[in-house]
Amino acid sequence: MSDTDSFIEEVTEEVRRDRLFAWMKRYGWMVICAVIIVVGGAGFIEYRKAQATAQYQAFGDGILAALDNNEAAERATALASIQGSDVGGRAVLALLTSKEQFDAGSQKEAQETLQLLANDGDVPLVYRQVASFKLLALQENQLSLAERKTGYEALIGGNPQLEVLVEEQLALIEIEQGNTEEAIAALGSIVQDSEATPGLRRRATQLIVALGGDVPEVATAQEQSE
């Protein structure tokens, strides 16, 4: 290699270094900030995940500790003192609390707890519907047949698993009203519903027989296979 070529290479390399240095002076801070954001963001996400996990664990531990109490009243009081971790957690907590309140003989408090949950627009629909369903069951002796029927009919079209239970209650109301044919038809739909549990289909089948109706053939085959 000649001295001229060597000199050209040295000059070229120096120019490259100067350009790189100038680029770093101009844009290097952006690269550093980007690295900090990426690394810091990942760390923040992991921190939030760990924090959320700890909150859910504390929430679950609180429920288990509350349910360890021997008396229903004590369990209800302990559950009522727990802070829900999110809307879903609050909904589950309210349902558990209402059950313990009812078991403790505090039916009014149980109804109030369920009513608050049913009216909470921030809670997912399925929880509100479950609360309304349980509330209607507790208010059986306080509402007329027409009021109960209207209340249950309002729950149709939501969660499929809950809907078959609603249909059972509507069938029972038809029986109370003396509408035997309508009750048998409703019960027949239940035993053929894929969402119905074996226990629910069995209850519906027994009611159909007791009312003098014919159990649908498909339902009969299902019952025989269970």
Image (cartoon, helix red, strand yellow):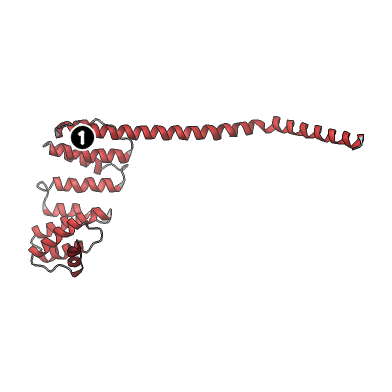
Q: At numbered mark 1, what does the secondary structure look like: helix, strand or loop?
A: helix
Q: As drawn, is 121 to the left or to the right of 171?
A: right
Residue at image point 14% right, 32% down: 71
Res 27 → quadrant:
top right
Is 189 situated above or below 84? below
Q: List the residue tagged with mark 1.
A: 67
Q: Is residue 63 above or below residue 193?
A: above
Quadrant position of residue 185 = bottom left
Q: Amino acid at mark 1?
A: Leu
Tell me the quadrant of the picture where the C terminus can be found.
bottom left
Question: Residue at image x 11%, y 61%?
Answer: 206
**Could you say where residue 213 lies in the image, as x and y percent from the top left?**
11, 67
Location of residue 122 with respect to 150 vertically, above or below:
above
- Packing grade of label 1 (10 A; few <14, some 14-19, many >=20) is some
Q: Nearer the viewer, residue 81 or 200?
A: 200
Res. 170 image quadrant: bottom left
Q: Quadrant of the N terminus?
A: top right
Residue 153 lies, in percent from the top left, at 21, 55
